[in-house]
Image: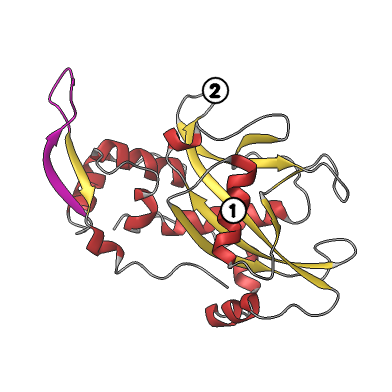
């Protein structure tokens, strides 16, 4: 596997919760004086405005009421009593951005007492990954806009902290087959796969080393297809071995 170092954010260092604890608390009843909500961090690869290189972007929605009126925030909303968590996360994404991601996974539960003024709000946060061509179909306008994930303005509530944690999780999991696959089509070249890794990790990777690492990882299947219309030697297309994803660790939930 490729070796890289990603610094652990404070939130991961300080949390005493285990995976099972969060699932139980998220699915359980909310105490009097509290409300349960869902939010989603959705990542896509888009060209940087200056360099043209692909980088991580995410859509945000502008708040139109207090608290934090006019600040940008993650897509989300209240959790109805009769709706499952993942279904609510997918629904709020469709309603705000018209996106339906192929990868949607529970990320973390945020429940600090002072994270929202007034009523205490516990938010179950999901993260989603979409391909670039899917991201282009997102509904944007005055109150929905894409932002570079590493260059965000001050956001409402603790949403900067949420995005920071989501970025850390993505960068520590990008080597797992199902993560990078979510940014790509069914078939892809090794150069396209390397481009995903470089965009997520924010650093250049040696092409030869990357090729050797990927070909020996057991996660790729070489096809008999090549890129059509290439001027020089056409690049071979690969696809992911679906069985490899069965060995990926379970989704991150705290």
Report which residue position mark 2 lands on.
Answer: 50
Q: Is residue 134 visible?
A: yes
Local packing at callout 2 (Cα closer than 10 Å; few below 14, some 14-19, many 20+) is few
CA distance for labels 2 and 1? 34 Å
Image quarter hosting the N terminus: bottom left
Q: Tell me the residue at 65%/34% (across/down).
A: 145
In which quadrant of the rendered view does residue 232 lie?
top left
Q: Give the image location of residue 64, x and y in percent.
A: 82, 41
> In the image as oriented, which residue stretches furthest toward the left?
224
Q: Is residue 220 above or below residue 206?
A: below
Q: Tell me the residue at 62%/61% (across/down).
A: 125
Q: Is residue 227 left or right of residue 112?
A: left
* Local secondary structure at mark 1: helix
Of 86 and 130, nearer the camera is 86
Q: Give the image location of residue 226, x and y in percent.
A: 14, 32
The mark that comes first in sequence, 2 or 1, is 2
- Which numbered dot is residue 91? 1
The stretch drawn in magenta includes residue 172: no
* Local secondary structure at mark 2: loop
Q: Which residues are magenta?
A: 220-235
Q: Nearer the viewer, mark 2 or mark 1?
A: 1
Of 250 and 137, nearer the camera is 137
In which quadrant of the rendered view does residue 211 lie?
top left
């Amino acid at each position: 596997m490729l070796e890289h170092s990603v610094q652990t954010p404070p939130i991961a260092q300080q949390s005493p919760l285990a995976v099972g604890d969060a699932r139980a608390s998220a699915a359980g009843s909310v105490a009097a004086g509290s409300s349960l909500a869902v939010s989603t961090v959705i990542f896509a690869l888009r060209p940087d405005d200056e360099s043209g290189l692909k980088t991580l972007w995410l859509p945000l929605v502008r708040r139109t009421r207090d608290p934090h009126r006019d600040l940008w925030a993650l897509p989300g909303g209240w959790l109805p009593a009769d709706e499952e968590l993942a279904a609510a996360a997918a629904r709020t994404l469709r309603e705000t951005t018209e996106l339906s991601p192929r990868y949607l996974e529970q990320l973390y539960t945020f429940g600090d007492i002072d994270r929202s003024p007034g009523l205490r709000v516990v938010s179950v946060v999901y993260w989603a990954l979409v391909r670039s061509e899917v991201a282009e179909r997102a509904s944007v306008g005055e109150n929905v806009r894409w932002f570079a994930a590493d260059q965000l303005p001050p956001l409402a509530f603790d949403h900067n902290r949420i995005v920071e944690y989501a970025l850390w999780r993505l960068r520590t999991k990008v080597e797992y087959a199902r993560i990078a696959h979510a940014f790509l089509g069914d078939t892809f070249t090794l150069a396209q796969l390397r481009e995903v890794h470089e965009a997520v990790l924010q650093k250049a990777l040696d092409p030869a080393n990357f090729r050797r690492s990927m070909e020996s990882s057991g996660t790729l299947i070489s096809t008999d297809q090549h890129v059509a219309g290439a001027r020089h030697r056409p690049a071979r297309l690969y696809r992911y071995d679906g069985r490899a994803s069965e060995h990926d660790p379970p989704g991150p939930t705290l």
